[in-house]
Image (cartoon, rainbow, N blue to C red):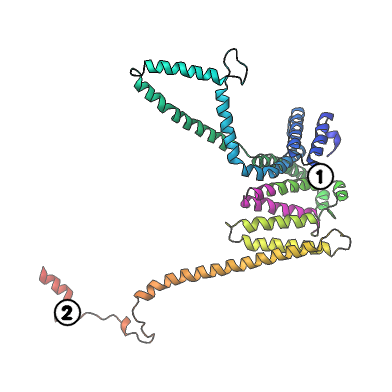
Amino acid sequence: MSDKKYNDEILKLLQLGAEAYAEKNYELSVELYSEACEKSNVETGQDDPDLLYLYGKSLYENAVSKNGVLGSSTAAASEKSAKAQNESSKNESGPGEKDGEKGMFQFNEQLAEEDDDDEQREDEEEEDDDDDEATPPIQEEEDEEENNEDKSDEQTDFEVAWEILDLTRTIFQEKLDEVTSKLDDFEKEKISAIPYLKSDSDKEIKAIESPVVSLKRKLAEVYDLLGDISLETENFKQATQDLNTLVKLRTELYPFKSGLVTEAYYKLSLALEFYTDDLKSIPRAIEAMENTVKSIKERAADANEKDVDPSLVTEMELRLSELKKGDEKIKAEKAKIMEGILGQIATPADADSKPAVAVNDLTSMVKKRKPKDSAGRKNGKRVKKAVE
């Protein structure tokens, strides 16, 4: 991301946003990156995918940091909101009153005056009073329905992050398609050999010259976050789709031993493991986990790689073993279910069937012709004529 791409005001926001993100002050980084996106859009008339990515990433981290807290305090937040609404309705200021200082004593005086008037007109307005008493509960129900609709329409941080990152993905993909369509034969041949990069080091990434490679790398990072959001929100079908694409992009970009490739396969195995709607998900999860283990072992065997934790290999192998055992149990359960189904199909026929006839005894299968009378007519027909 070149500094010349943005003006000083946006660069300042990006610097402050990066500092807030590094300090895990995600709420502040969300605000700063959001402002940078807005200013860039006003200046250029279009969305900047690089800025949108930073904004979406901060939204995701902010959602993750708040997820547990929000989940445990939903009821308290609703109660607090209801109290705030009640207080707001009670504290509506009249002429000559300060905001929030409407006196309860004055309110009670008004009630007393109304009670006196009601006592004088009690007999005359009894029916009207009954109608008035029936009104508040109905009004309360309507207010509750409106509040519930407002809450259901309110987007979560995860949903906002998804929309921002999905927009980012769309823009990057359009740019990649445009750049790819303009490549000549020499450039196409140049990027035909994969992986594009020798490693996933920062030095290697900064040396990227090809716009195709650069855009694919950015797309991979977006798909990575989209997959994380789907995992967090338990949308495992969407997670498998995005993480499949992530694996494809990263295996094109980096060597198989790369930590980024390992991570992609591992996340894909998680999504597939929990995607129970697909009968083939567990075998595919096992395959993804096998590639995870192979990638780690290949990296560990490289003398130049010094950051591989030996316990990580053991941990991944244990997970692979558990997946395989789980698949065996599933297969065993399926076999039992099939036996039960086949048994249920066979049992009724066996219960009602007659004793089996020997295979070489065909007498029971021979149809005997009915005897004819002297006139050559069947008894059935003759009887019928007699009846007639």
Q: Quadrant of residue 127?
A: top left
Left or right of residue 32, residue 307 in this image: right
Where is residue 260 shown, x and y percent of the image?
A: 78, 54
The magenta-colored residue range is: 228-255
88 up-or-down from 54: above or below = above
Q: Which residue is mark 1?
A: 211
> Is residue 239 within the magenta segment?
yes
Where is residue 57 shown, x and y percent of the image?
A: 73, 42
Q: Check disc 1 and give the amino acid type.
A: Pro
Q: Residue at x 53, y 36 (%)?
A: 148
Instruction: Judge by depth and name the residue closer to the eye, 205 or 106.
Output: 106
Q: Check disc 2 and give the amino acid type.
A: Gly
- Name the N-terminal-most of marks 2 and 1: 1
Left or right of residue 262, residue 351 in this image: left
Instruction: Judge by depth and name the residue closer to the eye, 272 or 86.
Output: 86
Q: Which residue is mark 2?
A: 376
Q: Residue at x 81, y 52 (%)?
A: 191
Instruction: Judge by depth and name the residue closer to the eye, 244 or 33.
Output: 33
Where is residue 110 shown, x and y percent of the image?
A: 49, 17
From the viewer's perspective, is the residue at label 2 or at label 1 nearer?
Answer: 1
Left or right of residue 345, residue 183 in this image: right
Q: Residue at x 80, y 64 (%)?
A: 297
Secondary structure mainly formed by the magenta segment: helix
Task: Characterize the local packing of mark 2: few (<14), some (14-19) or many (20 or more) Cα atoms within 10 angstroms.
Answer: few
